[in-house]
């Protein structure tokens, strides 16, 4: 759901009469909405999805940023959007699923159209075909949101996405193995979802993912389905319920090895790559792109266990807790500076 207070904050006007907020990693402004520019918007959709998600706001004049609102024609087009068709277009153009929603808000008697795009659960989102005027979307390309700009993904961000996907896959295996370990290999059975049959001699415990288990109904061999059309599986043997399942969490063993740079050291490393850069440039990019809270680039370096426990309990970062950074952060900041220097 897109909340109106969030959009009101995005469109807040400064004392100068211009928008207080600038375009960034999670925000893009457009002056008007037009169906002929859908491919351009879809490109932003995929870029936001491949990063942290974000908002695409229509009705903001460019240079200077003034919230004039949508014209009557643009508003009419925006309100005629068919979500089912748009989702179909996205599935046809990109791999993976892009989750999004839309809304129109009236603020200060002006209408603004808003798309909210959510962070993709499975990355990367990849273009499957050429699309749009001048092929603004190209087959095989991956788009990513950098600061206030959408562009083709760079190596550090792609590497981080790939590593994250490998980690997710490993965690799924760890979770499955923990369930089997709880039962014991001699007691575990394998569910064949293709044949819809579970068979193992002397099996006592069934290992099933919780989401799948909630959708299954079992009948014993020789019994009948009471409800016509109900989803059933043939059960050979008995199932003994387990009180709880232990979930294995992967914990970073050596944080400093993965994130070896303090903020000051990070600025020094960036300067080696971009000699004209300053500490202020690095601090600004960290702030604008919220790198302190992006675990692909940084981690919290808790000073003691109590700080860490307090954070786990409250979700609030303790005052004075520094962040430490990895090599991906160096490349990310350097890429932003290169873009700004063009």
Image: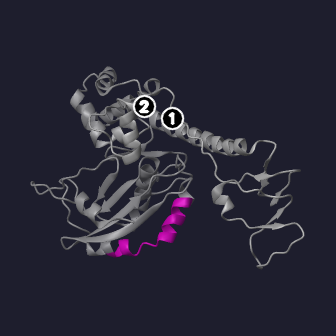
Question: Magenta span has 79?
Answer: yes
The figure's colour scheme reads: one colour
**Label 2, label 1: how many angstroms apart (C-alpha)?**
9 Å
Question: Magenta span has 84?
Answer: yes
Q: Is residue 302 above or below residue 81?
A: above
Q: Is residue 261 above or below residue 18?
A: above
Q: Specify the quadrant that holds the C terminus.
A: top left
* Main SS class of the magenta portion in the image: helix
Q: Is residue 101 above or below residue 22?
A: below
Of label 2 and label 1, which has the lower sequence position?
Answer: 1
Q: Which residues are magenta?
A: 76-91
Checking the image for residue 159, the label placed there is 1
Please rate how many residues cluster around mark 2, counting C-alpha atoms within 10 Å: few if below 14, some from 14 to 19, many from 20: some
User: Which SS class for mark 1?
Assistant: helix
In the rendered image, which residue does mark 2 sit on? 328
128 or 49, nearer to the observer: 49
CB atoms at circles 2 and 1 under 8 Å apart? Answer: yes
Instruction: Residue 180: give x, y in percent of width and height.
Output: 72, 44
Q: How many marks?
A: 2
Residue, x 76% and y 42% (percent of image)?
Answer: 184
314 or 5, nearer to the observer: 314
| Residue 224, picture quadrant | bottom right
Residue, x 83% and y 51% (percent of image)?
Answer: 203
User: Which SS class for mark 2?
Assistant: helix
Q: Residue furthest front?
A: 243
Checking the image for residue 224, the label placed there is none
Instruction: Residue 195: give x, y in percent of width and height.
Output: 82, 59
Q: Specify the quadrant that holds the N terminus.
A: bottom left
Instruction: Residue 329: give x, y in percent of width and height.
Output: 38, 32
73 or 301, nearer to the observer: 301
| Residue 262, picture quadrant | top left
Q: Is residue 152 left or right of residue 283?
A: right
């Amino acid at each position: 759901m897109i909340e109106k207070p969030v959009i009101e904050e995005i469109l807040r006007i400064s004392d100068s009469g211009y928008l207080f907020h600038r375009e960034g990693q999670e925000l893009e402004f457009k002056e008007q909405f037009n169906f002929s520019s859908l491919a351009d918007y879809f490109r932003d959709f995929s870029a936001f999805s491949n990063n942290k998600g974000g908002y695409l706001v229509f009705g903001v004049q460019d240079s200077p940023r003034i919230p004039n609102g949508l014209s009557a024609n643009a508003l009419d087009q925006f309100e005629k959007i068919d979500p089912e068709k748009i989702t179909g277009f996205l599935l046809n153009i990109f791999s993976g699923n892009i989750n999004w929603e839309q809304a129109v808000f009236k603020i200060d008697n002006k209408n603004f159209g808003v798309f909210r795009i959510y962070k993709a659960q499975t990355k990367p989102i990849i273009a499957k075909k050429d699309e749009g005027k001048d092929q603004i979307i190209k087959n095989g390309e991956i788009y990513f949101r950098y600061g206030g700009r959408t562009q083709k993904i760079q190596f550090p961000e792609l590497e981080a996405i790939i590593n994250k996907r490998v980690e997710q896959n490993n965690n799924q295996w760890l979770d499955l193995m923990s369930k089997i370990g709880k039962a014991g290999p001699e007691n575990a059975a394998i569910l064949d979802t293709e044949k819809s049959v579970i068979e193992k001699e002397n099996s006592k415990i069934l290992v099933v993912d919780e989401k799948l288990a909630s959708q299954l109904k079992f009948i014993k061999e020789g019994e009948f389905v009471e409800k016509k059309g109900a989803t059933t599986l043939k059960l050979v043997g008995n199932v003994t319920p387990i009180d709880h399942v232990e979930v294995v969490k992967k914990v970073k063993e050596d944080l400093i090895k993965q994130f070896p740079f303090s903020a000051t050291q990070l600025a020094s490393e960036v300067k080696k790559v971009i000699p004209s850069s300053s500490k202020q440039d690095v601090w600004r990019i960290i702030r604008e792109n919220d790198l302190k809270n992006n675990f692909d680039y940084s981690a919290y370096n808790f000073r003691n266990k109590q700080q860490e426990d307090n954070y786990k309990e409250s979700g609030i970062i303790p005052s004075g807790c520094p962040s430490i950074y990895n090599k991906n952060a160096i490349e990310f900041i350097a890429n932003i500076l290169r873009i700004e220097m063009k």
